[in-house]
Amino acid sequence: MNGLPYDFTNKKVSPWGGLRLIEETYRRSGLKQYLEEECQNLPAAGSNRGYISLDLADGFMVSTILGATRLAHSGTLRHDEVIRCIFGWNKGMDSQSTFSRFFRKFDQERNDKLFPVINWFWFSQLKLDKMTIDLDSNVITRHGSQDGVAHGYNPKRHRRGFHHPLIALVAEAEMVAHNLISLFRLQVLNQKHNSVLSTIRFQCIAIGSYQVKTGLKTTLRLSAKQKRRQFLEGLFSKVSNLSPPFQISNA
């Protein structure tokens, strides 16, 4: 039996067309515009050929949403022109070395200037009568000699190094603080239970797509059958009506 015939196309194709929903949530939350205004506090590129700082921050966020667990994983998306077009990046996804140089420029002084004002803005977008911050911890196994790696209690990999981050949770909203996916889950999916990121990625983000250009207009075509198409159309309708401040109910 002969194999399936193959051919080539010049179309810009991506398996992550559902990121269009995440991009609009990000934009309508006001966070993207606010970061653009605070961009002077982000580390700047050392040359005119460097990446825009906000594009680097966006690229790191997108890599994390798509399941990247190390900077090297971002390289798999460097040639995805559809993602670049969705987020309006000047260049494509950044490389591991570019991310490394970017994050090495953060020090305590820069962190103190940048993150408190971002925290203030994010929480000002949530309409809550009161706010209780719960702190939880996690263990992230490390196999190298990264900064801050310690040895101690590790329930999954005994005697392996790990990072031990603290996670801030907003009890009334049942969401991780500063988490765009939590906002998407509550405001667009209307889910009170905590769907894990991999489930949201499968339901809403992993959608085959390609770009079609007609004249000066570029359209993103998503591949979805009727039932899933109706589900996605409902999500696009909800996300197009997002507007802060966001009403968070703990009922």
Image (tube, rainbow, N blue to C red):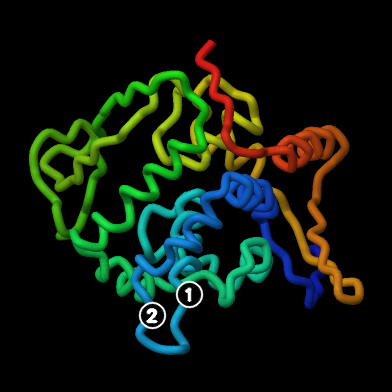
Q: Please, what is the three-letter code of the amino acid marked with disc 2?
A: Ala
In this view, the residue farthest toward the bottom is: 48
Helix or strand or loop: what does disc 2 sit on?
Answer: loop
Residue displayed at 65% across by 71% down: 81
Q: Is the residue 68 above or below the residue 251 in the image? A: below
Helix or strand or loop: what does disc 1 sit on?
Answer: loop
How many residues crowd around disc 2 within 10 Å: few (fewer than 14), some, or many (20 or more)?
some
Give the Cα distance between marks 2 and 1: 7 Å
Query: Which badge, 2 or 1, is on the more N-terminal residue?
Result: 2
Q: Is the residue 8 above or below the residue 170 in the image? A: below
Query: Where, by quadrant of the figure, is residue 191 drawn?
Result: top right
Circle 1 residue? 52
For the residue pair 247 and 86, the one nearer the viewer reads as 247
One can see residue 167 in this view: yes
* Image mark for residue 45: 2
Do the CB atoms of the residues marked 2 and 1 lie less than 8 Å apart?
A: yes
Looking at the rendering, in which quadrant would you find the N terminus? bottom right
Side (left or right) of 178 relative to 200: left
